[in-house]
Each structure stands twice: as structure tokens, then as C-alpha cells.
Image (cartoon, rainbow, N blue to C red):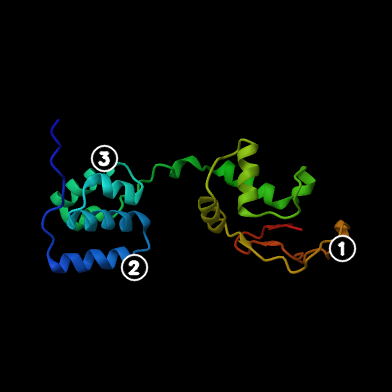
């Protein structure tokens, strides 16, 4: 049984090596950092299976990065984000999430007293409104002018009329852009 010939990146100049090392140490994008580490390991003549184990990725991924780096260079390290998920979040879903934010979770039958991004995400998914990540939900709420305010007290009263009309209650949600206000306590 013959062994497949190893796949390695082309010869990397010292300047390219410094650039790769800088990317692996300072990059804020995990995809870019992972690809740079794969290229550096290959430049150090590590075999594909060892790189795949080290990075916890498939051997096919390692080979693909190496081949693409040999063809196109550093351009390959940059992730190509697609906008596939953009059209899935339509207006009525935004309105539904804002309506949910306007009501206290306990009034809706949920066992918690304040909204958080993860709790709102769970409620949206459970009710079949949308299944999205916390980061996406945060962006949508920010685009709608909704911001979070930290809870200022450690306990909340059970009397719904305890807060004055027109004043935000502690832990309330502020929305200055559109004039909406919701209760979080």
C-alpha cells in the first residue's frame, strides 16, 4: 500500500511568515486566524492529518485551504461572508418581538421576570416566530432603536402600579428613536 504524497503550501518567504504569525496572534476573526494557522503549520512541513487533529477540522478543509493559498495567496485567509440569512427576518417578526418586549414575561406565562436576549430568543423560537441567534437579535433590536438598561434593584415588587406613569421602571427597555417603551420588571 503506497502512501499519498503530502500536501504542503508553497515556499513561504520570511516576510510572508511574519505576516502569517501576526495574523495568528492579532486577528479578531476566528476564520482568518484558523486559516493562517493551517498555512503556517503546512509551511513548517506538518502533514495534513496532524494539522487537522491540531485544529479540530477535517482533512479536506486543511487541503482546501492549502491548495487555495498556493493558488491565490493571502486573499484566501479572508472569510467570504454570504448574506444568505438577511431576508428571513421580515417586518412582522420585528413587530412581534417588539410586542413581546412590551409585555412582562410573567404576564405571558414565562417563569422569569425580565427579558434578556437569550430569553427573548427562546420565546421567539418556542412560539414559532423566528429561530435566530443572540447576535442577530441584538443587531435587529439595535436597528429598531431598542437598548437595554441594567436592573438597578435586586428585588421587584409585585404591585404593577408601583412605578409612575411615563417613567421607566428599573430595568426598563428604552427606545428613544421610535418613542416605544417596554416594561422589563
Is 42 or 141 nearer to us in this picture? 42
Measure the alpha-carbon separation of dots 2 and 3. 26 Å
Residue 14 has which mark? Answer: none
Label 2 Cα crowd, 10 Å radius (few <14 / some 14-19 / many 20+): few
Is 50 or 36 nearer to us in this picture? 50
Which residue appears at 36% of the width and 47% of the height? 56
Which residue appears at 68% of the width and 54% of the height? 115
Label 1 Cα crowd, 10 Å radius (few <14 / some 14-19 / many 20+): few
Residue 15 place in picture, x, y as percent: 15, 69
User: In which quadrant will I find the N terminus?
Assistant: top left
Residue furthest top in the image:
1
Q: Secondary structure at mark 3?
A: helix
Given contact means CB atoms under 8 Å apart, are the residues at marks 2 and 3 in contact?
A: no
On screen, residue 31 versus residue 101, left or right, reads left
Residue 76 place in picture, x, y as percent: 23, 52
Residue 60 has which mark? Answer: 3
Is 33 or 136 nearer to us in this picture? 33
Residue 87 place in picture, x, y as percent: 45, 41
Quarter of image, res 96? top right
On screen, residue 110 versus residue 3, left or right, reads right
Measure the alpha-carbon separation of dots 2 and 1. 50 Å
- Residue for badge 2: 26
Q: Secondary structure at mark 1?
A: helix
Q: Secondary structure at mark 2?
A: helix
The mark closer to the camera, 2 or 3, is 3
Residue 162 has which mark? Answer: 1
Label 3 Cα crowd, 10 Å radius (few <14 / some 14-19 / many 20+): few
Badge 2 or badge 1: first in the primary sequence: 2
Badge 3 or badge 1: first in the primary sequence: 3
On screen, residue 60 versus residue 128, left or right, reads left
In the rendered image, the vertical position of residue 88 relative to residue 102, given as above or below: above
Amino acid at each position: 500500500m503506497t502512501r499519498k504524497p503530502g500536501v504542503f503550501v508553497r515556499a513561504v518567504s520570511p516576510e510572508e511568515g511574519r505576516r502569517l504569525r501576526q495574523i495568528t496572534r492579532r486577528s479578531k476573526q476566528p476564520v482568518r486566524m484558523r486559516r493562517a494557522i493551517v498555512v503556517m503549520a503546512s509551511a513548517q512541513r506538518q502533514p495534513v492529518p496532524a494539522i487537522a487533529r491540531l485544529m479540530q477540522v477535517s482533512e479536506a478543509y486543511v487541503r482546501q485551504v492549502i491548495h487555495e493559498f498556493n493558488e491565490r495567496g493571502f486573499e484566501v485567509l479572508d472569510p467570504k461572508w454570504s448574506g444568505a440569512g438577511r431576508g428571513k427576518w421580515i417586518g412582522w417578526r420585528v413587530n412581534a418581538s417588539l410586542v413581546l418586549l412590551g409585555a412582562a414575561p410573567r404576564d405571558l406565562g414565562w417563569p422569569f421576570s425580565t427579558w434578556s436576549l437569550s430569553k427573548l430568543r427562546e420565546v421567539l423560537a418556542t412560539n414559532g416566530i423566528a429561530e435566530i441567534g443572540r447576535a442577530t437579535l441584538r443587531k435587529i433590536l439595535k436597528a429598531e432603536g431598542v437598548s437595554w438598561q441594567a436592573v438597578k434593584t435586586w428585588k421587584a415588587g409585585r404591585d404593577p402600579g408601583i412605578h409612575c406613569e411615563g417613567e421607566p421602571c428599573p430595568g426598563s427597555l428604552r427606545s428613544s428613536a421610535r418613542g416605544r417603551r417596554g416594561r422589563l420588571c
